[in-house]
Image (spheres, helix red, strand yellow):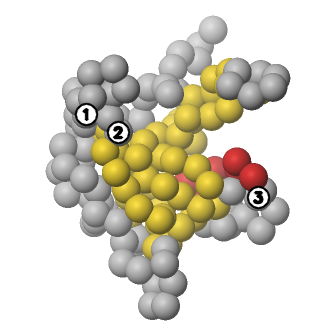
């Protein structure tokens, strides 16, 4: 099969109505209690908590985490005045399907990755993502 690993995908395909970031935190390895590192780049992994702006999204699909590999914590776009979250776009996204067997019955779930974050509508630059050079969009959960 030609597809190996994560599948590249456009931000607008994953979040056609946009997305809002609630926060970002380091991902810690459960066993070692140290920062989890990206297998391809060796950079620390960060989880951005995201709310999908799709009005039809419900339950687990409404709130997701997008992993970003970066040397330092990605800087989120500015808040919208009066709201507790920030409009966000992700650069160079990828999706990795996997089987989630933690519930009553197994289901297909998706791990989302990105190489960087930016303010919606901000050109192709990497503003808001200091030191993300070398980050990867490959990998799984």
Q: Residue furthest bottom?
A: 82
Sequence-wise, the earlier of marks 1 and 2 is 2
> How many callouts does the rendering have?
3
User: Which label lies toward us, 1 or 3?
Assistant: 1
Q: Which residue is mark 2?
A: 27
Q: Is residue 57 at all visible to an observer of this figure?
A: yes
Q: Which residue is mark 3?
A: 57
Distance (Cα) linking label 1 and label 2: 6 Å
| Helix, strand or loop for disc 3 | loop
Position above or below: 97 against 121: above
Q: Which residue is mark 1?
A: 35
Distance (Cα) linking label 1 and label 3: 31 Å
The structure residue drawn at horizontal position 50% and vertical position 28%, both measured from the top left corner, is 141
Distance (Cα) linking label 2 and label 3: 25 Å
Few, some or many residues within 10 Å of mark 3 (<14, 14–19, 20+): few
Position above or below: 75 against 60: below
Sequence-wise, the earlier of marks 1 and 3 is 1
Q: Is residue 26 left or right of residue 91?
A: left
The structure residue drawn at horizontal position 31% and vertical position 45%, both measured from the top left corner, is 26
Residue 12 at what x, y percent from top left? 61, 57
Residue 53 at what x, y percent from top left? 66, 67
């Amino acid at each position: 099969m030609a597809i190996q690993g994560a599948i590249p995908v456009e931000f607008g395909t994953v979040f056609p109505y946009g997305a809002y970031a609630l926060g970002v935190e380091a991902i810690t390895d459960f066993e070692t209690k140290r920062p989890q590192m990206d297998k391809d780049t060796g950079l620390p992994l960060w989880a951005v908590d995201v709310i999908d702006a799709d009005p039809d999204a419900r339950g687990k699909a409404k709130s997701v985490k997008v992993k970003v590999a970066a040397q330092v914590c990605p800087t989120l776009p500015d808040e919208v005045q009066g709201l507790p979250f920030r409009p966000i776009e992700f650069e160079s996204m990828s999706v990795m399907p996997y089987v989630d067997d933690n519930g009553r019955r197994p289901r297909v779930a998706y791990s989302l990755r990105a190489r960087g974050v930016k303010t919606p509508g901000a050109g192709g630059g990497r503003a808001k993502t200091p030191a993300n050079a070398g980050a990867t969009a490959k990998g799984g959960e």
